[in-house]
Amino acid sequence: MTLSRTQESQILDLHLAGLTQRTIAKKVEVCLESVNKRIQYFKGKGTVHMNNKTIYSSYNPLEEITRQRIRYYLSLEKRKSKYTANQLYELLLEDGFEATKSNVGKWLKLERNRLKEGYLDIFYEPGKMMQFDWGTKRLKIHGRNRIVCFAIFALPFSNYRYVHVTEKMDSKSFVDAFICFTKHIGCVFPIMLIDNMKIAVRHNSFRKNQVQLTTLFEQLENHYGMEVRACTPYRPNQKGTVENAVATLKQELHGLNQDFDSIKHLQNEINRVFSKLNDKKHPTKNNSCINLMKNEKALAGKVPSKHFIYFHETNRKVKNNTLVSFDGNHYSAPEEYKGDKIIVRYNDRTVKLVNNDGKVLAKYSRCYGKGYKKYRVWNMLNMHQRKSDGFDQSNQKRQLPRWMKKLYNDHFENNAAEYFIFLEIIKNVSRKTVKRMINYHGAYDEKLTVSSAIEFISRC
């Protein structure tokens, strides 16, 4: 037991005063063994102040040089062929190093332990990051065993978790899950950490050291004003919070162990379970996960007024009649793209024709029948001018918007050629100006002609 100089002096004074060792130990408040040791030392040395032991350095130059050589051989190891202690011992002897076999085995173990991967304890700032991962589980839905997918979001600071049930792990399912998460939480975090899933990361051999996001995730970044980061491949520890959430989800599902009526029923059960988990106290913070999430929400970004709309993409060729074939139906594209390939973007409601520069050429409501043809008069003005005689009997006339039909019947009936010249003139004029022009001619009961249209536009 280490004693102070004052305690050692008190022990000597009381011993010289004739007190017993037990009494001295009680008065100085030290153990009896320490008192006995100091008194015996005083009888032999003449003082109770014990000299400190000499501390020798544990550094051994020969050991350090040998271990450096072991590190060199470990750097030459391959994944499936590693050196044994006996092999290293023989190699060291050949190199002129004198070491025993037992020491080589001990040093080899220490060096291998030193090379094992360690992890940093990362500090997460509130309101800065969310993590995402997929999970799957075979469950009984409406009496049938099915593999159900789960989109899992986790906040590393507050440990708040949200699960959205999906049937697939594709782009559309991710967008739906992300929109549900942003609506549920009411904010958008600046950084989203994901793994290297195919729908998010493009693996290009000529840019191995750079992570390239797919078009979908680039659009999500731009729309929500966030940054999407991908983990290093085969390093799930970089998003450990959501990985733990996946494990928790599977444990809870195993505990439920029931036949769910539908996907919606399963979603409600998961919401109930995770609502209880999020109400619990955080493992290291003196608050519940949901309250910590509310504090994060105040620091995160706002959700845009309109959520992202997901579109599938495919390439199609424009035929000579300006039509693009898609899903058994046909949609009209501008005449100048005849014979070219354009992009067809579509979802459940809309079909967009887009050129390679990203400009939207035409937009249609999606047809689910077969053999339907959708025309747009603005896309084929040149053809209509050359074939104006047959316009009255064409399907293109029947698909004109109501205001364009009324304009044709009131002002250009039986004169389709002039009608298309008029449309060519107003093609780049604002809708407001065209509306004023039509109202002006209607108010003064004048017939709208090409000449009067040019005169009106020149006055504006």
Image (cartoon, rainbow, N blue to C red):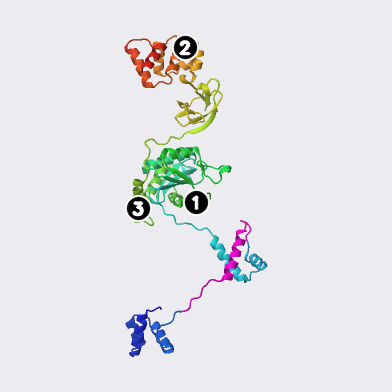
Say whether residue 308 is visible: yes
Q: Furthest-front residue in view?
A: 459
Residue drawn at (41%, 39%), measured in percent from left and top?
Answer: 224
Q: Residue at x 41, y 52 (%)?
A: 124
- Mark 2 vs mark 1, foreground winner is 2
Query: Which residue occupies the foreground of this view, 171 or 37?
Result: 37
Callout count: 3
Residue 270 image point, x, y percent: 41, 46
Secondary structure type for disc 3 = loop
Instruction: Judge the density around disc 2: few (<14), some (14-19), many (≥20) Cα neighbours within 10 Å.
Output: some
Lower position in the chain sequence, tag 3 or tag 2:
3
From the top left corner, tell me how far across and down residue 214 is, in percent: 50, 39
Q: Quadrant of the N terminus?
A: bottom left
Element at badge 2? helix
Q: Neighbour class for label 3 at 10 Å: few (<14), some, many (≥20)? A: some
Q: Residue 237 in the image: x percent, y percent?
A: 48, 53
The image quadrant that residue 282 belongs to is: bottom left
Quarter of the picture holding the C terminus = top left
- Please state the horizontal and vertical placement of residue 385, each as a whole percent of the image: 49, 14
Q: Earlier in the sequence, mark 3 or mark 1?
A: 1
52 with respect to 104 (left or right): left
In this rendered view, identify the residue nearer to me: 39 or 350: 39
* Among the 4 quarters of the image, the one containing residue 363: top left
Residue type (three-letter) at the residue carrying disc 1: Pro
The answer to if 205 sits in the magenta stretch is no
Chain part drawn in magenta: 53-82
Residue carrying label 1 = 236
**Mark 2 lies on residue:** 417
Q: Is the residue under label 2 in contact with that under label 3 (CB below 8 Å)?
A: no
Which numbered disc, 3 or 1, marks the residue closer to the eye? 1
Q: Is residue 384 above or below residue 233?
A: above
Residue tagged 3: 288
